[in-house]
Image (tube, rainbow, N blue to C red):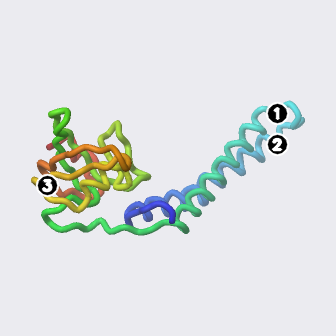
Amino acid sequence: MGERLTRSDVEKIEKEIEYRKLTVRKEAIEAVKEARAQGDLSENFEYYAAKKDKNKNESRIRYLERMLKQATIVSEDSKADEAGMNNVVEVYFEEEDETETYKLVTSIRGNSLENKISIESPLGKAILGHKEGDRVWVKISDSAGYYVVIRHIRKTTDDAEDAIKSF
């Protein structure tokens, strides 16, 4: 089983593939041609740099296409009162007596510096599908974990990037 992606993730990946194939690939091929035309390839740094950029682009295209082939599509929909994909969730950590706010996202968009947690992470798995006021166990391993309380859930759209800051 591959990545768990939403429809909007798939659309973004497809757009990137198209851009890389139609724009970046043409530019990279042209850069290789221009560098090759400069003469002696044994000491031509521009040629090697252009080839490296071209190969990097082709590698990225293959990676994204493989990701799409192996992906599992997950729904962005959730019940009105449950924590779901792209929702901003305020979570109370009992042991630390602290409250944090997170946005639930797929693993490819997870970014702990922006408080975007993956639904594949221990905390994401624990709070996904739960309601405000629920006390849930976050399982770290078979013998370790901790409790959190879901304080508040706010439904957002996929494009609401600044949703966390406006809680």
Q: Looking at this view, name the residue that lies furthest to the left.
A: 133
Q: Amino acid at mark 3?
A: Asp
Local SS, label 1: loop
Residues at marks 1 and 3, CA–CA distance in whole angstroms: 64 Å
Task: Tell me the quarter of the image containing the C terminus.
Answer: top left
The residue indicated by pointer 2 is 36
Q: Given contact means CB atoms under 8 Å apart, are the residues at marks 2 and 1 in contact?
A: yes
Locate residue 115 relative to residue 109 in the image: left or right: left
Locate residue 66 relative to residue 48 in the image: left or right: left
Measured as percent of width and height from the top left, residue 81 is found at 13, 63
**52, 9: nearer the viewer:** 9
Local SS, label 3: loop
Local SS, label 2: helix
Measured as percent of width and height from the top left, residue 15 is found at 48, 61
Q: How many marks?
A: 3
3 or 2: tag closer to the N-terminus = 2
Residues at marks 2 and 1, CA–CA distance in whole angstroms: 8 Å
Q: Nearer the viewer, mark 1 or mark 3?
A: 3
Q: Amino acid at mark 1?
A: Asn
58 to 73, vertically: above or below: above
Crowd band around label 3 with a 10 angstrom C-alpha radius: few (<14), some (14–19), many (20+): few
Residue 134 numbered mark, or none: 3
Crowd band around label 2 with a 10 angstrom C-alpha radius: few (<14), some (14–19), many (20+): some
The residue indicated by pointer 1 is 44
**72, 55: nearer the viewer:** 72
Measured as percent of width and height from the top left, residue 136 is found at 20, 52
Measured as percent of width and height from the top left, residue 103 is found at 27, 49
Crowd band around label 1 with a 10 angstrom C-alpha radius: few (<14), some (14–19), many (20+): few
Q: Given contact means CB atoms under 8 Å apart, are the residues at marks 3 and 2 in contact?
A: no
Q: Nearer the viewer, mark 3 or mark 2?
A: 3
Residue name at image x 55 percent, y 68 percent: 69
Q: Amino acid at mark 2?
A: Arg
